[in-house]
Structures are given as structure tokens and as C-alpha cells.
Image (cartoon, rainbow, N blue to C red):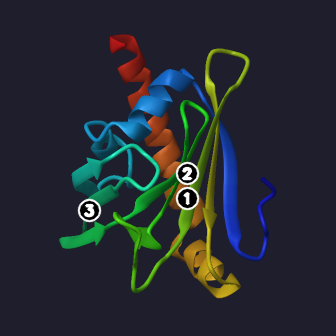
Amino acid sequence: MTPDPDTDLSFTRDLAAPRTAVWACWTDPRHIPHFFIPAPHRVTACDIDLRVGGRFDTTFEVEGNVMENRGVFLEIVPRERLVFTDAYTEGWKPAPEPFMTAILDFADDGEGGTRYTATARHRTPEARRNHEEMGFFDGWGVVATQLEAYAQKLAVRM
């Protein structure tokens, strides 16, 4: 996949955690609250039905405001790729105001860690620009750092 600079935001980072642990973090609702949004904000609920068309629903608390995000998985390649969107909810019901599609790629980094690529694909250049101005790189960077730290702890228990 080649990102479109007009509509996509993307970054790649090598995480010092095994791919199996990073994958588990993204696919098990018990793990999502430990990394999914930048601290001190928090995930208060997560419901995952890990199948194409299955739900990926999260509820956040950000500065006292509750935010619900409903979405579905579009593509699942175990331990390699997750694609989900808020353009639809479970049952392929269109969302009234979709924001983005997330594409997460996982590969071995050759040193026991994970090469992690996160892409946010937007419907328009304006939506992409707005997301970047909201702090995409800083926010998703913090999430990647939190993901790495949590996946390292999880790997010890696996």
C-alpha cells in the first residue's frame, strides 16, 4: 500500500516488543485500555468482535467528556494487518459522520521486535489536514510508546 499524501497520515516505528504481543494488544479488548489513547485520557470500555464486519467499539474519557467510537473491521491478516473504520458500524450501517480508516501493519524488525506502521486514511484532504492539526503525529506517537511499554510487559506473561 502506498499512502496518498493528500488524504493519508502515516508513520513507522520499530517497537522493542514481539509482534505476537503487539498483535494481542490490538485484538484483545482487555489490553486496549492500557495504550489506546494518550494518557492521562483513558478508555473506559472496549468491545471487539475480531472478524471482517465485526465491531471495534471504544469509549473514551477525555478531560471529563465521554466519547463513543463505533466501527468495524475491514481486513484482518493475523499478526500482519488490521484495518478498521468508523465509516460503518456493525452490520455495515453507515455512520453519519465518519472520520477515518485506520490501517495497522505489523512486521518483524529482524531483532525480535515489531516494525509498526500506522496509517490514518481520510475521505478528504481537509479531513486529513484537520487530523494532523489535532496532533496526529504527537498523539499516535504517544500511543505507540504506550503500546510498546505495555506489549513488553505482556510478552513476559505470554
Mark 3 closeness class: few <14, some 14–19, many ≥20 residues within 10 Å: many
Left or right, 46 with reference to 4: left
Query: What residue is disc 3 on?
Result: 60
Which image quadrant is residue 30 in? top left
Query: What residue is disc 1 on?
Result: 102
Residue 28: give x, y in percent of width and height: 33, 36
94 vs 81, nearest the viewer: 94
The three-letter code of the residue at mark 3 reads Phe
Depth-wise, is mark 1 or mark 2 nearer the camera?
1
Left or right, 85 with reference to 36: right
Residue 21: give x, y in percent of width and height: 45, 24
Give the numbered dot on residue 141.
Answer: 2
Q: Residue at x 34, y 56 (%)?
A: 55
Q: Residue at x 41, y 69 (%)?
A: 92
Quarter occupied by the C terminus? top left
Left or right, 9 with reference to 18: right
Which image quadrant is residue 60 in? bottom left
Whole-number angstrom distance, CA of label 1 to CA of label 2: 14 Å
The three-letter code of the residue at mark 1 reads Ala
* Vertical order, 56 against 120 (above or below): above
Q: Residue at x 32, y 46 (%)?
A: 49
Residue 141: give x, y in percent of width and height: 55, 51
First in sequence, mark 3 or 1: give its number: 3
Secondary element at image label 3: strand
Whole-number angstrom distance, CA of label 3 to CA of label 1: 17 Å
Q: Are marks 1 and 2 in contact (CB under 8 Å)?
A: no
Mark 2 closeness class: few <14, some 14–19, many ≥20 residues within 10 Å: some
Secondary element at image label 2: helix
First in sequence, mark 1 or 2: give its number: 1
Q: Are marks 3 and 1 in contact (CB under 8 Å)?
A: no
* Vertical order, 68 against 126 (above or below): above
